[in-house]
Image: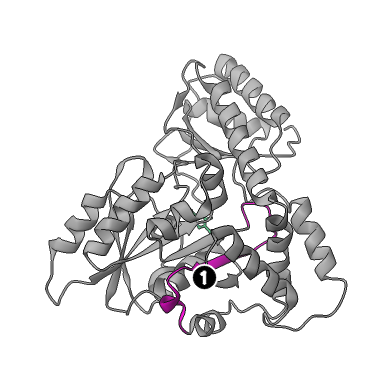
Amino acid sequence: MREIRRHFASDNYAGICPEAWAALEEANAEHAVGYGDDPWTARASDLIREVFETGCEVFFVFNGTAANSLALASSGQSYHSILCHETAHVETDECGAPEFFSNGMKVLTVPGPLGKVDPSGIEQLVLKRTDLHYPKPRAVSVTQSTELGTVYAAEEVKAVRAKAKEHALTLHMDGARFANAVASLGVQPKEITWQAGVDVLCFGGTKNGAHAGEAVVFFNRDLAREFEYRCKQSGQLCSKMRFLSAPWVGMLEDGAWLRHAAHANAMARRLHDRLLGLTEVKILFPVQANAVFADLPLPVALALRQIGWKFYSFIGQGGCRLMCSWDTREEDVEAFAADLEVCLREAPRDIPIPTGRSRKL
Ligand SMILES: Cc1ncc(COP(=O)(O)O)c(C=O)c1O
């Protein structure tokens, strides 16, 4: 097995980007007040307000599952429901945390092409039942960029919002890869958030280059009421908060967050172009952010793994997700594509295929 330094399994595999690292180092130089009353947290919150060009409430938590769950919990009561796409991380990969942290809000799924919520599906779920025995819909959650590597255009967010508003639902955005969506669309962050009607955004830092941490950004400030208590109760109030907030300062101050996202997107585009036209390889979804989904013959995927490549397969039988990061290099793309070409030529097709699929994103 060859030593491979950068994989395509997940943007979580990548290390800490230099800007976040430098800020952490600086924050480490002296003492600072704990629990968020420190200059780094104040500066990071202000920078987020500058990025979105609006007043908003900002909270830093350790990870995306907590950010999503607590943000969604703040939108309703235990008897409410949350509507999201059937591939949404909040439904498929958070171990019931949104239900847990909301004391029972039920997650209901909506279909829609390319990982995006179909607004008419929202209506169908809302109108399906209006009686007392049904968990009353209260929030819609969309993921930007989506779990399938596609991106909602501003108009698409607005269409979801219009339907949500019609039925008095709040709009939550899981932005674990929000930076990749902004870089892909070339819009101002406000255009696909509060101007499109998003009430609360979980703004991803980890996949963008931080060591850990997501920012929960409430554009609808009413929803932020007592949110700090939710954070504390759920173990998400970081005592040395500056180490969650400082990376944001490093990454936002000089635009590194967008540069890194644009780079990851460009690497995905390059990988896509390299795979396009290879016999037996089928690109599954439009490549609009930093992920390429490709259908590979199972023996070929297996042979790539035997060489040492790591990537996930969870979309059907041979569907592989190839995720690019801020640190993916052109030579990584080339090395993967070259190995894939060899495996396509040489991998025996009659070997027994192990059953079961890997799951985690
Ligand atoms: C779409 C999406 N949302 C949220 C998350 C955040 O999850 P975690 O709790 O692992 O930080 C992830 C991570 O894989 C994700 O892909």
Image coordinates of residue 354 in percent, x first then y, are: 48, 37
Res. 133 image quadrant: bottom left
Query: In the displayed structure, would residue 310 be above or below residue 237?
Result: above
Give the residue at x 82% y 58%: 22
Of residues 275 and 28, which is closer to you in this image? 28
Give the residue at x 66% y 62%: 212
Of residues 55 and 282, which is closer to you in this image? 55
> Please, what secondary structure does the residue beneath circle 1 have?
loop
Res. 242 image quadrant: bottom right
Query: In the displayed structure, would residue 58 be above or below residue 296?
Result: below
170 left or right, relative to 12: left
Residue receiving disc 1: 56
Give the residue at x 68% y 57%: 252
Q: Amino acid at mark 1?
A: Cys
- Residue extent of the magenta highlight: 206-225
322 left or right, relative to 212: left
Of residues 178 and 79, which is closer to you in this image? 178
